[in-house]
Each structure stands twice: as C-alpha cells, then as structure tokens.
Image: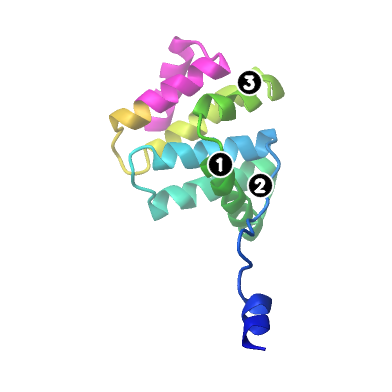
Amino acid sequence: MLERLIAFFGNPAGYKTPLPEADAPHALGALLVRAAKADDAYLFEEIVVIDKILAKRHELNPVEAAKMRAECEVLEKEIPRTSDIAAILEHAISTAEKEATLLALWQVALVDGTIHTEEDTLLHRIEEVLGVPPERAKALQAQAQG
C-alpha cells in the first residue's frame, strides 16, 4: 500500500519532462539562457531581462514568458553545442531578427555590468553562426552597452 502511494505521488524512476519543441522561439530563449550562464552565474537580474525579451518578442504575459523561459532552460541543458541552437535560428529568422537576437544576447550578457571572456567568446561564436557581419555585431554590442 505504501509503495503504491509513493509511486502515485512520487516521480516514477526514469520519468523526464519532455523537451520543448526546438523551434526558433525556443532556440532564442535557449541562447539567452546560455548567454546568462556563460560566466557560471545565472543571476536573478538576467532572468528578469530574459523574461522581458521573451514577453516582448512573442507577445506573452509575464507568466507565459516565465513558463517559456523554463522550457528554454530545459532545451539549453539538453543541447550541448551552442552552434546547434544557433543553427535553428540561422535559417528560420530574417536578418533583422538575427540582429535583434544578437542585441538581446548582449543585453543579457551586460546585465551584471561586466563582459566576461566566456560571454564575449560565446556571443562572437553566435554572431558567426547567424551570419551577422563583425562590424554590425560591434555596433549592436555598443548599442546594448548604451
């Protein structure tokens, strides 16, 4: 009887939450999460910025944006190569959206006021995969720095 109750209320062995769809909106969110975690510190302030970006880009309310971010966190954890996540966006979004994505990534990276080497390296790798020219990428970084 106790075993059945534990099985009913507990997490059955091996059960995993299904991955969200690896579509462009979730890939963007996964990259934002990856940028926030690049310096090995996932700060509350970064989470707030990610939620605001997701809400604005996808016309979500705050609860929907937080739920989407949580899905993106799962996707980010399950796709180890950043280039694989960025490649989803490479063919799915316009040049303007690629630039907006890079700007959003810089905004997340700059929340703590410091660009760490890991963040800088990550964002330059993403700009290459997205095909954003280096001079335009520098302008977007400067815009994010404000």
Residue at mark 2 to residue at mark 3: CA–CA distance: 21 Å
- Residue carrying label 2: 19
Main SS class of the magenta portion in the image: helix
Residue at mark 3 to residue at mark 1: CA–CA distance: 19 Å
User: What is the crowding at mark 2: few (fewer than 14 residues within 10 Å), some, or many (at least 20)?
Assistant: few
In the rendered structure, which disc, 2 or 3, sits on the residue that comes first in sequence? Answer: 2
How is the model colour-coded? rainbow
Indicate which disc residue 78 carries: 1
Residue at mark 2 to residue at mark 1: CA–CA distance: 8 Å
Is 142 situated above or below 4?
above
Report the mark closest to the observer, 2 or 3.
2
Name the element at disc 1: helix
Q: Considering depth in this image, is 67 or 139 the residue closer to the camera?
A: 67
- Residue carrying label 3: 90
Q: Position of residue 35 (x, y in %)?
A: 44, 36
Q: Considering depth in this image, is 13 or 50 the residue closer to the camera?
A: 13
| Amino acid type at mark 2 | Leu
Residue 52 can be seen in this image: no
In the rendered structure, which disc, 3 or 1, sits on the residue that comes first in sequence? Answer: 1
Name the element at disc 2: loop
Quarter placement of the N terminus: bottom right
| Amino acid type at mark 1 | Glu
**Given contact means CB atoms under 8 Å apart, are the residues at marks 2 and 1 in contact?**
yes
Residue 57 can be seen in this image: yes
Q: Which residues are magenta?
A: 121-146
